[in-house]
Structures are given as C-alpha cells and as structure tokens.
Amino acid sequence: MPFRPFYVLLLLAAISTSYAIPFPRRSASSSTNASVLILGGGVAGVIAARTLHEQGITNYLIIEARNELGGRLTSHKFGAKDHQYTVEVGANWVQGTETPGGNTNPIWTLANKHNVSTVYSDYFDSMTTYDYTGQMDYLDLFNKSIDAYTMLTDVAGARVARREVDSTSRTGYSLIGSKPQTPQEMAAEYYQFDWEYAQTPEETSWIASSWANNFTFDPSEGGFSDENYLCIDQRGFKTIVQAEASEFLDQHQVLYNATITDIAYSPSGVQVSLADGRVINGQYSIVTFSLGVLQHDDVVFEPTLPDWKVEAIQSMTMATYSKIFFQFPDNFWFDTQFALYADKERGRYPVWQSLDLQGFFEGSGILFVTVTGDFSERIEALPDSQVQLEILSVLRNMFPNVTIPDPIDFYYQRWHSDPLFRGSYSNWPASFFSEHHENLRADIHGRLWFAGEHTSMKWFGFLHGAYFEGLDVATRVADCINGGGCISLQHFNEVKNARSYTVG
Ligand SMILES: Cc1cc2nc3c(=O)[nH]c(=O)nc-3n(C[C@H](O)[C@H](O)[C@H](O)COP(=O)(O)OP(=O)(O)OC[C@H]3O[C@@H](n4cnc5c(N)ncnc54)[C@H](O)[C@@H]3O)c2cc1C
Ligand SMILES: *[C@@H]1O[C@H](CO)[C@@H](O)[C@H](O)[C@H]1NC(C)=O
Ligand SMILES: *[C@@H]1O[C@H](CO)[C@@H](O)[C@H](O)[C@H]1NC(C)=O
Ligand SMILES: *[C@@H]1O[C@H](CO)[C@@H](O)[C@H](O)[C@H]1NC(C)=O
Ligand SMILES: *[C@@H]1O[C@H](CO)[C@@H](O)[C@H](O)[C@H]1NC(C)=O
Ligand SMILES: *[C@@H]1O[C@H](CO)[C@@H](O)[C@H](O)[C@H]1NC(C)=O
Ligand SMILES: *[C@@H]1O[C@H](CO)[C@@H](O)[C@H](O)[C@H]1NC(C)=O
C-alpha cells in the first residue's frame, strides 16, 4: 500500500550528492572482519540477519551490547524466591494478529511457530473503573472515549482525502468535539491514546497516529486485526527472536557484551569501535539502535551525520512507557484484566493490570500499573522507595476499605535513562514530515543503513515495525552485495514549506 504524502507542499527533492570524505581517523584496513555488520541484536537486527542468511550471505556479524538477543523484548524474573514469574518489562503484546484472507502480523507468526504462550487481552470489555474516592462506575465515559478515538482516526482519514495539513491529535479531538474536562473523562481518554502512543494527544501527530492505528488494527485498511495477545511465556517474549535465531545463527556470527562507541563510515566501508578497544571492519552496516540512542549521541559517528539525517533524528520523538510491578501476599483488587484510575492529575498511575487471574498467573499476587511520557521520565529520576510510596497511596484511594499490605517485590525498568535505549519506542509528532521520515530511513553512501521500529512509516513503535524494517533494509543490502552495486534510498537535503509572513 503506498504511503500517501502528508502535505500539499512544494518539495525540493535534492537527491544525494557525493561526499568527498577520506576514511576517517584510523587508517583503513583492507581486511574486513565481516561483509555486513549488524549493529544491535533486537528484532530488527535478528530479522536482518535471517534475511541475509536466506539470500545466501553468511559473512555478517551481529554486534550486541547485552548478553542476549531480543533488545526491547526484555523479561525480568519477578517475585519472592519461591514464587517467581517471568514478567515482560519491555514489549508484551502481539498487537493485531491476523485476518483470514488479509494480512498477518509476522510477530504472531513467530509466536505461534515457537509455541510462545499468549493470552487474549481484553482491552475494552474487562475493565473496572476507579477514581480518587474509590471504585466509581464511569464505564459510560469509557465507552464514549472508545467512540471518540474511532472518530479521531476517521476524521484524520477524511483530512488526508482533502489533502489538509496534519495537526496534533489534541486539535483533532477538539475538532470532533471531544474535550475531556473531568478526571474520569481524562483517564478514559488517556487509556485510548497515551497508553498506546506513550505521549499525550498534544505531543502526537493526528494523521500519523491514525495511520499507525489503522495499519495495525484495521483489516479494512491493511491492518492485521483488532486483537491484542499478551505474552505470558515463562521463557520470555524474547523467545520469538532467540528461538528463530537458533535456526540459522552460528556462534561466530554474533558478538555479545560488545558495546559500540564509534562508527566510522565512508563510501568504501564501515569501521566500528567497541568500548573494550576492539575495532571491527565491514563493507556495509545496518544500524538498529533505538531512535533515543541516535538522538543522545551514545554512539559517535565519524564524520558526523549529515544535517538532513540529524534533523530527521532529532525531529521524531522517543517516548517512554513504564510498567511498575508489585507482588502482594494476597489479591485484594479487581477481577477484571484492567482497571482505570482517575487521579486529579492526568496520567498519574492511570492504567492497572492484574496478572493474578485465571489464564494468566493465577495465585501470583502480581499487579502492575503503567505510566507514560513525562510521568515516566519523572519516576525514573526518583528513588524506587518514593515511587512505591506514591503508588501505595493511590491504592489506598482506590481501595479505601482495604488495609494495603507491604509488597513482597517491586520493580520497574528505567528505559529513558538506559544508554542502550533512551526510551521505549518512537512517536510521531505533528511537526514531523513524511520527508523527514524518509531521511530517517535513508542510507548514507550505500554503506551505512538504518533499521528499527522508528524507521517504519506504517508501524513505528511496534515489534512488527522493527521486523518489517529489518527485512526490508537487509534485502536492500543483500542486493548491494549480490547485485553488484547499491541502490540508495532517496533522501531530501532540505525539507521545505516555510513561507514568508509578508510574501504571499
Ligand atoms: C516498555 C515497552 C513496551 C512495549 N510494548 C510493546 C508491545 O506490547 N507490542 C509491540 O509491538 N511493541 C512494544 N514495544 C516496542 C517494541 O519493543 C520495539 O518496537 C522493538 O522491540 C524494537 O526493536 P528494534 O530492533 O528496532 O530495537 P531494539 O530492540 O532496541 O534493538 C536494538 C539493539 O541495539 C543494542 N544496542 C544499543 N546501543 C548499543 C551499543 N552502543 N552497542 C551495541 N549494541 C547496542 C540494544 O541492546 C538492542 O538490543 C514496547 C517497548 C517497550 C520498551
Ligand atoms: C578484525 O580484523 C582485524 C584485521 O584482520 C583484526 O586485527 C581484528 O582483531 C579483528 N577484530 C575482531 C573483533 O575479530
Ligand atoms: C557476557 O557477560 C556476562 C556477565 O556480564 C557473562 O555471564 C556472559 O558469559 C558474557 N557472554 C559472553 C558471550 O561473553
Ligand atoms: C507448547 O506449549 C505448551 C504449553 O506451554 C506445551 O504443553 C506443549 O507441549 C508445547 N508444544 C511444543 C511442540 O513445544
Ligand atoms: C459499554 O459498551 C459495552 C459494549 O462494548 C456494553 O456492553 C456496555 O453495556 C456499555 N456500558 C455502558 C455503561 O454504557
Ligand atoms: C482509518 O480507517 C478508517 C476506516 O476504518 C477510515 O475511515 C479512516 O479514513 C482511516 N484513517 C486514515 C488516517 O487513513
Ligand atoms: C467501605 O466502608 C464504608 C464505611 O464502613 C462503607 O460505607 C462502604 O460501603 C464500604 N465500601 C465498600 C466498597 O465496601
């Protein structure tokens, strides 16, 4: 399906010029350690490796800082010693599964292939609602927020048909007459919106978020299905890539515990330096680090990336989604899969999930709450003890008649502060143009390629976005090698639409 351009604009498509850059700093070695260096072993990296393998290219090397494959598919052993469960602190759902005669989410295919246990997650019909006074039934408002979100995506589509400019999702909500005023209305809106995009409607593109929703959840728009399945496999959700990799990956094709500090690139190849001083040469490289890592300069490029690439990297947003886990001695809470808590402050400990349910981890005593965006960054800067106290006081609001016991275990992952991630997944702001997005994906010299959830126009943020990008970019690199030359992706030297205030 072609991606329809965002704006009615005059675009100057200045196609790549040549860079006369000598091979930087270190003297180039004519020997290469591998033909393709795959930088990062998450979903995009592993699927890129599998794609090269399928194209008959085995001379590649995955270089990964952690001691296992999976990236943001990160599991954590949680709970008292004799009462431990594997919980997912990163990606947890297969989002959109399959529709007969339609498209299938490749993450769903991998989960089924490797017998990874998942359970149907009932987003809309298994909800208990609370506010700061205790249990409070506002399912009518909750239902309204579902309808408002559907209308938001519909009207975005109508704007595209009329070639109207993008705006924020807040503008969109206002234009369709949805203006949450009360804490309950705000919590309901949060659940439909922030809980998915990890940022507020103010911070998010109306059109891009609507497309991302449709391309994943709406079969009539090419999406997979509207179902979400939660992984509860005790091997961890990462099994989908680890088991897949074990079918084709040799030990010598991956370096673990290998943190990359520098990437030197030129028209003739790539040279990667590791924190431990090792230097590795390649003919091509596929950079799969998160958008946050690229934004934060955790890895230094030599020479510095061209302005069009830097502008693209800095103009997309890396959002944060944090799940905060509790194990309690007893289950004192709701018997639905989800609960919504309306605080007077929007986004303060709003979405709750019980894992102590039949079909999940019954008898586990595990409950978790999710926060996103600025609130995530706030709690990352606080000590665990303070966050725990805040949440226990929220639980006292929700359950005024229960003496809330001390938790047995407590954990949350600090994604935003982690130099290997710098956030959880990307989000598309209203100021980001589709040309920026092409620039985010575009290669440099046919040697330095970029792949990951953030380079996916249709599925940014999702596991399946990372999958499709690993597949597409590695196919292009394989063509470079097997086809005897590279066809670079288009990029725009400048993204234009400014107009003078005084000249028509
Ligand atoms: C909390 C959370 C919840 C999520 N929930 C879902 C969900 O339910 N469903 C869904 O579809 N998606 C979800 N996502 C998004 C999904 O996890 C990502 O889209 C996907 O995993 C990204 O894969 P990737 O290969 O692009 O990047 P990554 O998984 O980030 O892979 C990049 C790899 O590069 C490595 N790396 C980074 N820096 C260096 C360095 N300097 N040197 C060497 N290696 C380095 C990292 O360790 C990592 O392994 C969630 C993400 C998070 C964090
Ligand atoms: C890469 O190849 C160079 C030159 O042959 C060698 O010195 C270096 O040790 C190799 N690096 C690794 C990590 O194998
Ligand atoms: C990576 O480091 C961990 C300890 O941090 C160690 O247990 C593991 O064996 C190492 N893996 C490799 C392949 O070196
Ligand atoms: C798949 O998983 C289920 C439960 O997790 C298990 O009972 C079954 O034996 C597994 N099947 C295979 C083929 O591994
Ligand atoms: C909300 O919608 C569901 C159907 O999706 C319906 O069963 C339920 O009665 C509705 N609740 C309220 C309070 O409107
Ligand atoms: C999303 O899908 C709906 C149909 O379900 C459609 O009306 C709308 O135009 C689509 N939105 C976009 C942005 O394409
Ligand atoms: C909580 O206790 C108060 C006072 O004893 C009582 O009025 C109320 O019904 C109780 N609420 C629940 C949910 O049990």
Image (spheres, rainbow, N blue to C red):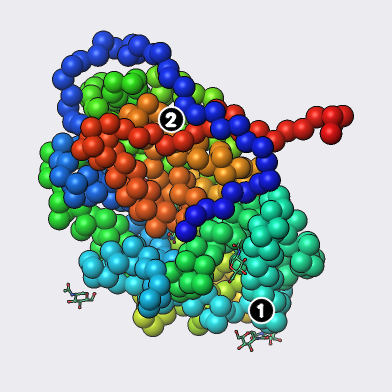
Q: Is residue 180 above or below residue 75?
A: below
Measuring 53% from the left and 42% from the top, which residue is drawn there?
437
State left or right for residue 233 relative to residue 411: left
- Disc 2 from disc 1: Cα separation: 43 Å
Residue on which the image places disc 2: 298
Which sits in the foreground, 123 or 371?
123
State left or right for residue 164 relative to residue 425: right
Q: Residues within 10 Å of mark 2 (few under 14, many from 20)?
A: some
State left or right for residue 258 relative to residue 391: left
Which sits in the foreground, 65 or 61?
61
Quadrant where the C terminus sits is top right
**Identity of the amino acid at label 2?**
Asp
Measuring 37% from the left and 26% from the top, which residue is drawn there?
445
Contact, CB < 8 Å: mark 2 with mark 1?
no
Q: Is mark 2 within 8 Å of ligand 1?
A: yes
Measuring 60% from the left and 60% from the top, which residue is drawn there?
210
Residue 224 in view, yes or no:
yes
**Secondary structure beneath label 1:** helix
Q: Is residue 469 above or below residue 262?
A: below
The part of the image, by quadrant, that contains residue 464 is bottom left
The x and y percentages for residue 351 are 57, 66
Which sits in the foreground, 493 or 13?
13
